[in-house]
Image (cartoon, rainbow, N blue to C red):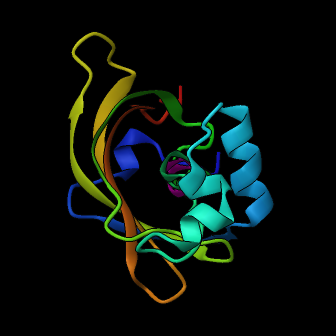
Amino acid sequence: MPGKYYDELEPGQTIRHALGRTITEADNVLFCGMTLNSQPLHLNEDFASRTQFGQRIVNGILTLGVVVGITVPDLTEGTIVANLGYERVEHPRPVFHGDTLYVETEVLDKRASRSNPERGIVRLKHTGRNQRGETICEVERTVMFLKQPVEE
């Protein structure tokens, strides 16, 4: 599995994900349509041009989804049981069409599952940055991971 098992994650560990993703206008418009989000700040260039941003901004939930998604190949692909929660989601800067997102993950803490000895709970902090290195999203996430299988 390309993802990490519970046993491979330690508090204080930092993972810099090499994958980056450029967010396009099509991504944003499609996402807003699929989620029934009619916010003109995301869809109406005339309206958005008169805001403090001067242009449309990318839907924050799309940004959050991409930030978490970028982490999957290095972190949870094939080793996750479930996402247990998301906390402290922050968007300190907007994302614009054409921005490229990169992510770094810090392992905050971990503990063995109380109900299943083959699983463990890990709390992570994902920090998303744009191509200029500016933080555009931070989120703490609690994940249930598989422990490494015991060889018999």
Q: Is residue 19 magenta?
A: no
Residue at screen point 21% across, 55% down:
11
Q: Nearer the viewer, residue 110 or 42?
A: 42
Q: Residue at x 39, y 21 (%)?
A: 118
Which stretch appears magenta? 64-69
Residue 18 seen in the figure: no
Q: Among all residues in the image, which is located at the extreme bottom?
A: 132
Q: From what the image shows, is residue 120 above or below residue 7?
A: above
- On screen, residue 119 versus residue 64, left or right, reads left
Q: Nearer the viewer, residue 76 or 119?
A: 76
The relative height of residue 30 versus residue 99 in the rendered view (above or below) is above
Q: How many marks?
A: 0
Residue 146 seen in this snapshot: yes
**65 inside magenta stretch:** yes
Q: Main secondary structure of the magenta part?
A: helix
On screen, residue 113 versus residue 23, left or right, reads: left
Q: Position of residue 24 (x, y in %)?
A: 74, 67
The percent coordinates of residue 1 (x first, y second) are: 65, 45
Q: Quadrant of residue 32?
A: top right
Of 14 and 47, nearer the camera is: 47
Quarter location, residue 70: bottom right
Q: Is residue 69 above or below residue 84?
A: below
104 vs 121: above or below = below
Residue 59: give x, y in percent of width and height. 55, 52
Q: Residue 99, percent across and down?
A: 61, 77
Closer to the camera in the image, 124 or 119: 124
